[in-house]
Image (cartoon, helix red, strand yellow):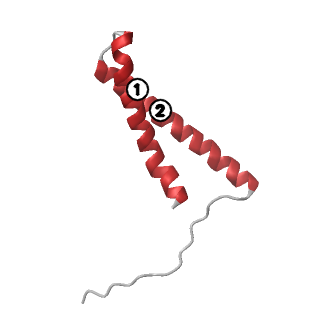
Amino acid sequence: MKVSMLVYLVPIATLMAGAFLGAALSGPLHINQSLASVVLGFLFMGMTFLVLRIYDRRSEVRGDGHHPRMTRILIRNDA
């Protein structure tokens, strides 16, 4: 669950945070609100993916990387 949250929820949260920050800063900077929201949102999300990639590489080097494993196979018989 922890790794799934890092991969899925954190980038979306940073995208939203960047968009809100862009909207808030657009007035004082005198730029288009939509443009500022899009640019900062994607910038924040991109930085998050970069940080996650660095974290993943370092965890592989240390040997504590996350390796998914299959615990069981669910078979559904729709005959």
Q: In this view, does 41 lie above or below 6?
A: above
Count the marks: how many?
2
Residue placed most toward the observer, 32 or 70: 32
- Determine the CA span between mark 1 and mark 2: 10 Å
Q: Residue at x 41, y 34 (%)?
A: 17
Task: Point out which mark residue 43 bears.
Answer: none
Mark nearer the viewer, 1 or 2: 1
First in residue order: circle 1 vs circle 2: 1
Q: Residue at x 49, y 81 (%)?
A: 72
Amino acid type indicated by mark 2: Phe
Q: Which residue lies furthest to the right in this view?
A: 62
Task: Name the side, left or right, on which 24 lies relative to 4.
Answer: left
Label 2: state its secondary structure. helix
Q: Residue at x 56, y 38 (%)?
A: 50
Task: Name the side, left or right, on which 53 lies relative to 22.
Answer: right
Q: Is residue 77 above or below residue 17?
A: below
Q: Which residue lies furthest to the bottom in this view?
A: 79
Q: Label 1: which residue?
A: 21
Task: Point out which mark residue 44 bears.
Answer: 2
Q: In which quarter of the image is the C terminus?
A: bottom left
Q: Residue furthest left?
A: 79
Q: Position of residue 63 (x, y in %)?
A: 73, 58
Q: Which residue is drawn at 49% across and 57% down?
A: 4
Badge 1 density bin: few <14, some 14–19, many ≥20, Cα 10 Å: some
Amino acid type indicated by mark 1: Leu
Q: Where is residue 66 in the image (x, y as percent from the top left)?
A: 62, 60
Label 1: state its secondary structure. helix
Residue placed most toward the observer, 35 or 73: 35
Badge 2 density bin: few <14, some 14–19, many ≥20, Cα 10 Å: many
Residue placed most toward the observer, 46 or 11: 11
Q: Position of residue 20 (x, y in %)?
A: 36, 29
Contact between labelled residues 2 and 1, with CB atoms less than 8 Å apart:
yes
